[in-house]
Structures are given as structure tokens and as C-alpha cells.
């Protein structure tokens, strides 16, 4: 009997090593892929003043930030290789099984299993708030361990200082925190302050399912803001937290536009005029966001742009620029969002070439590739 128990313990230990050591990494490798490894030559890429992107889910994967990986889309060495100045790192706290862009409920949670497999703290297995806040603190841990090569930006003053410092050292990189889905506030509007204090500077009201605040474009009801959601939006405005309309239902977008006056973003999206599906923005909403001096981030994956290369993204960028101006469109890659992107972060020179083919001049390309994000954040982040 002792031999049997001993054998079972060994099998259990081996199974645990396999599960915790390889399963989570396997998910990362298999879900965060690229359409092409080819990087085209853009001789003037190094002249861009501020390369930036509005949406990356790297924190979900518990990946070693300081190693250059051959899988996934973003880590510090690849950001530096790409000359990336500023990346928004977004927090994913809950994703239902079988997600699609048409209809999802909130009855399942794949991120709970992933958190367990990654050996994150036990409190993150059961609390969406703790799960999200742990990812927030992780970004600050990266900054502290980076020997000054990576900073987290949460105020206008910090961004201004970073821009000055980067002129003398273009290997400096920076990140900011965003929230993908307000469900991790756990139905308590007072929790907004906890996320603000944790450095979150934009919040997407919904993700793939309707929640207590608003309807999702991919939910069951696809309704608008609830009464609690209206209160949340107003408190976000008072605090200076930017509203992200990515994944919001048509009615939710209308409701946000009706009750708030501040500029908003759509951090990662496509547009129906170039790629018509449930995921993407209508012309009416593009124009309304433009009138508010908002910013629309165009994605680097097929569902967003109806194509698997930089040219497809450039066509959607051209569509937005023609509608509301070149100063209101940016990159919203959705790197590491459990999707196949056109390329990883080192492939951003491909975008410069594609934008040239769309007829954008160097000054316009500089804005699209990051200048617009820099300028938007300088206008809309809290002062200090």
C-alpha cells in the first residue's frame, strides 16, 4: 500500500509540474500568434518621434517581461527593438468560453483557470477585482526591476518628463494601464478609486458580455448604460479616467455620448465602412467621436480589418482619417489578446510602408504611429 501511495504522490507531482510548467505557456504560444514573420524595410522608421499603441494584453500571460520570446507579441526587448516609446497594457479579468463577436453570456470564466495554472495568488482565482489589481501591480513590478529602462505613466507630468528624458535615451520605454471591462469593479462604483490609485487611466465599460454597467456589442441583450453605468461614467469623468468604447454596444456608445463631454477613445477596433461586422464602429459613431476630439485605435488582426497584413490595417486607418481627420486615428493592435495579429511588435515598420502606400505623408505617418496617442494623453491625463 505504501508503494502505491508513494507512486501516486510521484504521479501527482509530475502531473503538477507538467500542468503548471507547461500548460499556461502552451496557451500563450498557441493563442498569441502572427500571420507573418516578415519585417519589411522602412528606412525612415527610426525617424518617427514617438511610436505608441493603445492596447496590449501581455499582462494576462504572466510572461517574463525581460526575456526576448519567440512567441507572443510583446516583451521589453522586442519593444526596445521596435523603438516603442509607449504601450498601453490592458487588464483582462474575465472571458467566457467559446467567445465570439455575436453573442456571449457571463456564465463561464476561462481566466479563472488560467490564473490557477499560472500559480497567481489564490485571491485572484475567485475575485475579479483582485485578479485585475494583481495585473496592475505587476506592471509596476516590471518598472522597478527594469533598472530605469521602463516606466509606468499615470499623469501628464510623468509623460512630459518621460518625453524629455527619451530624447537623450531612445532605449527608454513606457507603459500605461487600461482596463478591459468594468465588471472587475464587482458592481461597486466606489471600487473605481482603487483602480485609479492603481494607475488605471482608461476603462472599457464592457468586454465580451453584458455586465452590470452596460451592454456589450457581443452580449445577449446588447442594451445601453444601466443607471449604475451612468453613475460610473460620471465618476470616471470627475476623476479624469478616460472612457474606452471598445466592445460597447451601439446603445451604450449612444448613451455615453449623451451624458459625457470629455474626449473618449476606442482602444482597439475596426470600422464598418472598411470591414463590416458586429465588432466594428459605424460611420455615425466615428463622426461623433471625432467631434469630441476622441481617438480611434485600429487593430492589427483579421476580424478588425478584414485582412491579415499591414495593408488591411492601413486601409481602415485611411477610412477613419478621411472621415474625421488624421489627428484622430492611431494603432490599437490588441497584441497578446489571444489572437493572430499581422506581426509582433517588431513588425511595426510594416505599418510605415503600408501607410505610405495609402498616400500618407511623413508628418501624417508620424502622428498615426504614435504622435496622436502622445498628444491625446498630454491633453487628457490628470496633471499630477
Image (tube, helix red, strand yellow):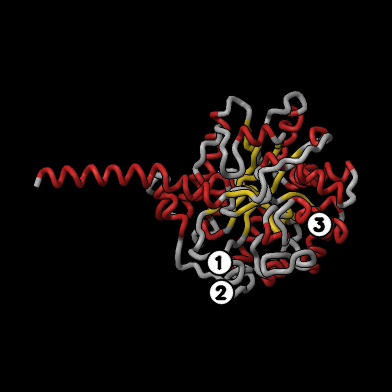
What residue lies at 65% left-to-right and 51% top-to-bottom? 35
Q: Earlier in the sequence, mark 1 or mark 3?
A: 1
Q: Residue 209 got which mark?
A: 1
Q: CA distance from mark 2 to mark 1?
A: 7 Å
Please say if 55 is above or below 228.
Answer: above
Question: What percent of the width, then of the height, locates residue 76?
Answer: 61, 34
Q: Residue at x 64, y 63 (%)?
A: 247
The residue pinned by badge 3 equals 315
* Vertical placement of residue 115 versus 306, above or below: above
Query: Dividing the picture into quarters, in which one does residue 234 lie?
Result: bottom right
Q: In this orientation, which residue lies closer to the viewer: 17 or 228?
A: 17
Circle 2 is placed at which residue position? 220
Residue at the image point whose x is 67% and y is 60% from the top: 246
Mark 2 touches mark 1? (CB < 8 Å): yes
Q: Is residue 75 left or right of residue 44?
A: left
Crowding near pointer 3: few (<14 within 10 Å), some, many (20+)? Answer: many
Circle 3 SS class: helix
Give the CA distance from mark 1 to mark 3: 29 Å
Amino acid at each position: 500500500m505504501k508503494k502505491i501511495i508513494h507512486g501516486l504522490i510521484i504521479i501527482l507531482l509530475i502531473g503538477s509540474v507538467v500542468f503548471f510548467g507547461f500548460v499556461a505557456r502552451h496557451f500563450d504560444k498557441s493563442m498569441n500568434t502572427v500571420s507573418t514573420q516578415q519585417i519589411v524595410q522602412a528606412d525612415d522608421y527610426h525617424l518617427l518621434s514617438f511610436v505608441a499603441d493603445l492596447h496590449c494584453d501581455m499582462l494576462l500571460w504572466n510572461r517574463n517581461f525581460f526575456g526576448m520570446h519567440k512567441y507572443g507579441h510583446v516583451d521589453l526587448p522586442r519593444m526596445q527593438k521596435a523603438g516603442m516609446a509607449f504601450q498601453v497594457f490592458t487588464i483582462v479579468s474575465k472571458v467566457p468560453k467559446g467567445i465570439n463577436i455575436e453573442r456571449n453570456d457571463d456564465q463561464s470564466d476561462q481566466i479563472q483557470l488560467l490564473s490557477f495554472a499560472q500559480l497567481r495568488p489564490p485571491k485572484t482565482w475567485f475575485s475579479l477585482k483582485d485578479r485585475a489589481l494583481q495585473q496592475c501591480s505587476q506592471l509596476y513590478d516590471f518598472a522597478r526591476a527594469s533598472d530605469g529602462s521602463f516606466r509606468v505613466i499615470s499623469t501628464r507630468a510623468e509623460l512630459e518628463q518621460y518625453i524629455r528624458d527619451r530624447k537623450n535615451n531612445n532605449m527608454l520605454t513606457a507603459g500605461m494601464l487600461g482596463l478591459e471591462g468594468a465588471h472587475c469593479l464587482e458592481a461597486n462604483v466606489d471600487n473605481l478609486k482603487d483602480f485609479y490609485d492603481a494607475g488605471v487611466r482608461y476603462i472599457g465599460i464592457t468586454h465580451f458580455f453584458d455586465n452590470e454597467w452596460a451592454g456589450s456589442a457581443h452580449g445577449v441583450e446588447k442594451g445601453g448604460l444601466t443607471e449604475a453605468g451612468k453613475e460610473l461614467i460620471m465618476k470616471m469623468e470627475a476623476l479624469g479616467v478616460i472612457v474606452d468604447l471598445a466592445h460597447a454596444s451601439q446603445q451604450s456608445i449612444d448613451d455615453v455620448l449623451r451624458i459625457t463631454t470629455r474626449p473618449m477613445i476606442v482602444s482597439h477596433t475596426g470600422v464598418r465602412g472598411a470591414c463590416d461586422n458586429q465588432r466594428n464602429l459605424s460611420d455615425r459613431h466615428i463622426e461623433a467621436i471625432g467631434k469630441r476630439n476622441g481617438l480611434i485605435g485600429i487593430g492589427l488582426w483579421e476580424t478588425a480589418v478584414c485582412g491579415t497584413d499591414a495593408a488591411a490595417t492601413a486601409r481602415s486607418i485611411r477610412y477613419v482619417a478621411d472621415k474625421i481627420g488624421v489627428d484622430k486615428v492611431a494603432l490599437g493592435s490588441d497584441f497578446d489578446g489571444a489572437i493572430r495579429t499581422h506581426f509582433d511588435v517588431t513588425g511595426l515598420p510594416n505599418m510605415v510602408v503600408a501607410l505610405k502606400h495609402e498616400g500618407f505623408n511623413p508628418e501624417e505617418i508620424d502622428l498615426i504611429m504614435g504622435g496622436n496617442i502622445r498628444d491625446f494623453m498630454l491633453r487628457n491625463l490628470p496633471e499630477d
